[in-house]
Image (cartoon, helix red, strand yellow):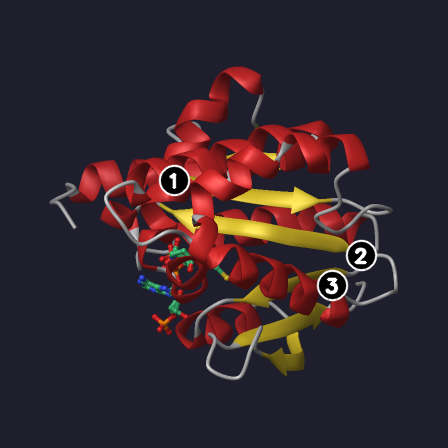
Amino acid sequence: MTDVSPELLAQRKRAAAAPRRAVLADAPVVSRTLARSFATDPVVDWFVRDDARREKALDQWFDFAVKKLGLPGREVWMSDDSSAVALWIPPPQDTMQLSIVDEVAAIPMFLSVVSFQRLGRMQRLRAAFDANHPKAPHWYLFFLAVDPDCQGQGLGSAILKSTLDAIDAKHEAAYLEASSEKNVPLYLRHGFEIVSEFRPEPTGPKLWGMWRKPR
Ligand SMILES: CC(C)(COP(=O)(O)OP(=O)(O)OC[C@H]1O[C@@H](n2cnc3c(N)ncnc32)[C@H](O)[C@@H]1OP(=O)(O)O)[C@@H](O)C(=O)NCCC(=O)NCCS
């Protein structure tokens, strides 16, 4: 974590509380925030390749997630300075679904991100996500991220609250998987409840499926 002045932090917090929809031109900075913040995430750590090409792989994966999964649904929200990001997949899709054509086209990207050795991990992870995904319609929080320089200062809570307020205005449900135990209290505070606990394989990382009833 580098030093960020209190004034800059306050400014970033205000920006996170009033996010805007990201557009294609924002994709590089949104992906960068995701790649930086998820670099130490236990699940990402488990499936992304673990060699000299890891940093590039993280950029590649989040670039794909933003452009192919987030932006088409028009629910990628960002603080104007991109230090806080929330990528929602709205109903009725609400999962990481790709058409057969996109799935085939994505094979070289997946291989490059995870490496041949970890391809099985990626497949087991996707199967575990699918098996535990709720059937009822909901908004799916695919990624929430705050730049590592600003974590623990309320930015994540601010962008989460703002985007949940918009979901509450539609009286719709929300779902996410918490990928580390320290994130669970954050989501409990915002009204999510734990509905499942699972691992992609017995020695793999633990995930918490969390559901938020419509309000
Ligand atoms: C999780 C994340 C979005 C939270 O945003 P934030 O601005 O750091 O969090 P806030 O300051 O609003 O709230 C703090 C709470 O977030 C959680 N938290 C998770 N990771 C944290 C971190 N690195 N630093 C501080 N709080 C963290 C804790 O529950 C914390 O509550 P506590 O202080 O009572 O322990 C952010 O820390 C992040 O991007 N982490 C890495 C990526 C990630 O894990 N994303 C979510 C995947 S489910």
Is residue 6 among the parts visible in the rendering?
A: yes
Q: Earlier in the sequence, mark 1 or mark 2?
A: 1
Comparing labels 2 and 3, the label whose residue is closer to the camera? 3
Ligand 1 is found in the corner quadrant, namely: bottom left
Labelled disc at residue 138: 2
Q: Is residue 8 above or below residue 122?
A: above
Q: How many marks?
A: 3
Q: Going 71% across and 28% down the picture, which residue do you hit?
A: 72
Q: Going 14% across and 41% down the picture, which residue do you hit?
A: 5
Q: Is residue 76 left or right of residue 94?
A: left
| Residue type at the position of mark 3 | Asp
Comparing labels 1 and 2, the label whose residue is closer to the camera? 1
Q: CA distance from mark 1 to mark 2?
A: 30 Å
Q: Rate crowding at label 3 as few (under 14), some (14 to 19) or many (20 or more) other CA atoms within 10 Å.
A: few
Is residue 19 among the parts visible in the rendering?
A: no
Q: CA distance from mark 2 to mark 3?
A: 14 Å
| Residue type at the position of mark 2 | His
Front position in the image: 171 or 32: 32
Q: SS at mark 2?
A: loop
Labelled disc at residue 130: 3
Q: SS at mark 3?
A: helix
Q: CA distance from mark 1 to mark 3?
A: 23 Å
Q: Going 66% across and 29% down the picture, which residue do you hit?
A: 105
Instruction: Find disc 1 in the rendering and name its residue.
Output: 57
Q: Earlier in the sequence, mark 1 or mark 3?
A: 1
